[in-house]
């Protein structure tokens, strides 16, 4: 475990237990957008005594303290995202994989002008099929 990770949790007001550090090591560094069950499966292989309740409580604590975002990108599917800066998402219909799309790759007209709404945050969620190999999405020029 990285001492920086322990300090990062402390700086966020979280007491760094062994279980929290194990969850943090995976979920705060992954490119995936894992569900709680995926986090449990991944981390439990390293920390067998980790319980489902501990994972759920830890993920909710990380969201509450601003280390993760909790997203519902498909009906009934809650995932966790360690990237806190504004960005969009692409969901591959073939694999179900969720990828980050740079904020400036998608142009959205001014959502603040949407009459009758007070827009405080937005993101675009796209679905489709990824073409070619494992390259990251790039903004079009």
Image (tube, rainbow, N blue to C red):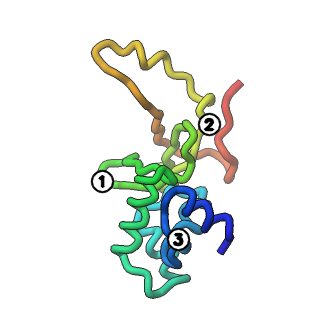
Q: Secondary structure at mark 1?
A: loop
Give 109 or 128, whichever is nearer the viewer.
109
x, y percentage for residue 127?
Answer: 46, 41
Asked whether the beta carbons under mark 2 and mark 1 sit within 8 Å of each other, the answer is no
**Residue assigned mark 3:** 16
Instruction: Determine which quarter of the picture holds residue 6.
Output: bottom right
**Picture quarter with the C terminus:** top right
- Picture disc at residue 102: 2
**Taking 115 as reference, is 68 above or below it?**
below
- Picture disc at residue 56: none
Q: Residue at x 40, y 46 (%)?
A: 73
Work out whether mark 2 precedes mark 3 in sequence or the reverse, and give the earlier one: 3
Q: Residues within 10 Å of mark 1 (few under 14, many from 20)?
A: few
Work out whether mark 2 precedes mark 1 in sequence or the reverse, and give the earlier one: 1
- Horizontal side of 23 relative to 138 (left or right) equals left
x, y percentage for residue 74?
Answer: 36, 48
**Taking 106 as reference, is 39 above or below it?**
below
Instruction: Determine which quarter of the picture holds residue 24.
Output: bottom right
Q: Residue at x 38, y 74 (%)?
A: 54
**Residue assigned mark 1:** 76
x, y percentage for residue 125?
Answer: 46, 38
- In 3D space, how far apart are the residues under numbered discs 1 and 3 (Cα atoms)? 30 Å
Mark 2 vs mark 3: give the one in front. Answer: 3
x, y percentage for residue 97?
Answer: 51, 55
Asked whether the beta carbons under mark 2 and mark 3 sit within 8 Å of each other, the answer is no
Q: Residue at x 37, y 67 (%)?
A: 56
């Amino acid at each position: 475990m990285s001492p920086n990770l322990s300090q990062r949790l402390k700086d966020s007001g979280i007491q760094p237990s062994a279980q929290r550090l194990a969850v943090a090591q995976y979920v705060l560094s992954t490119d995936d957008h894992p569900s709680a069950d995926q986090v449990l499966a991944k981390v439990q292989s390293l920390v067998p005594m980790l319980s489902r309740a501990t994972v759920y409580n830890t993920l909710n604590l990380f969201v509450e303290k601003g280390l993760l975002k909790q997203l519902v990108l498909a009906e009934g599917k809650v995932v966790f995202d360690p990237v806190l800066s504004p960005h969009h998402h692409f969901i591959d219909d073939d694999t179900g994989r969720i990828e980050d799309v740079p904020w400036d790759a998608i142009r959205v007209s001014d959502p603040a002008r949407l009459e009758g709404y007070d827009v405080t945050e937005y993101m675009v969620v796209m679905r489709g099929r990824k073409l070619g190999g494992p390259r990251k999405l790039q903004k079009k020029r």
